[in-house]
Amino acid sequence: MAEIKNILCAVDFSDMSPRVASYAQTLAKALNAGVHVIYVAPSLDQHAFFDVPLPSAQSFVEDVAAEAEKKMEAFIRDNFSMENVMGKIARGYADEEILNFAGKENMALIVMGTHGRKGVDRILFGSVAEKVIKSSSIPVMSIRPV
């Protein structure tokens, strides 16, 4: 049986994120594993197709990342009662950054939520969870909204 000592909990700070954290914490406690919580902030190149002046876009991206740092601290404090939890803010495309971090840090499991997007939203935004599940070399536990 595979040994799970590092769990990656991917969140987007939506209403679904505490539920995802609960699953990650439950598994971590049962398996005596550590948890790394990751949030991926958009990078500047993701806004290139909008007609936004570069300084404004750069400022926006930096503001999002700074706010994410604050949210991460509060999120971990409010949603985890265990000691072995670390937060990580990455920049880029969420699926790529989640998979890159999981590989570099030797994660054994990814726990993440799905949004259940349909129709035009799914066509425009795709599904980060679906991309991660299809591309991951490690198991992924996806938590659907209730």
Image (cartoon, rainbow, N blue to C red):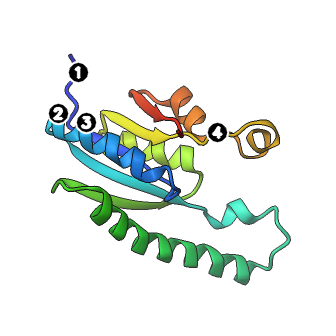
Residue where numbered disc 2 is placed: 31
Calculate the distance from the C-alpha at mark 2 to the C-alpha at mark 3: 6 Å
Which amino acid type is marked by label 3?
A: Leu
Q: In the visual, does 117 lie left or right of 31?
A: right
Count all numbered tags in the image, as a single digit.
Answer: 4
Of the image marks 1 and 4, the number of the one nearer the N terminus: 1
Calculate the distance from the C-alpha at mark 2 to the C-alpha at mark 1: 11 Å
Work out whether 131 lies above or below 40: above
Disc 4 packing (10 Å; few <14; some 14–19; many ≥20)? some
Which amino acid type is marked by label 1?
A: Ala
Which numbered tag is attached to residue 27?
Answer: 3
Between disc 3 and disc 4, the foreground one is 3
Name the residue located 77 percent from the left edge and 44 percent from the top edge. Answer: 121
Disc 2 packing (10 Å; few <14; some 14–19; many ≥20)? some
Name the residue located 48 percent from the left edge and 77 percent from the top edge. Answer: 66
Kind of element beneath mark 1: loop
Name the residue located 52 percent from the left edge and 39 percent from the top edge. Answer: 146
Work out whether 123 lies above or below 40: above
Q: Residue furthest top?
A: 1
Point out residue 38 in the picture as x, y percentages from the top left corner.
Answer: 41, 54
Q: In the visual, does 42 lie left or right of 31?
A: right
Which numbered tag is attached to residue 2?
Answer: 1
Work out whether 71 lies above or below 81: below
Residue where numbered disc 4 is placed: 127
Calculate the distance from the C-alpha at mark 3 to the C-alpha at mark 4: 24 Å
Q: Quadrant of residue 59?
A: bottom right
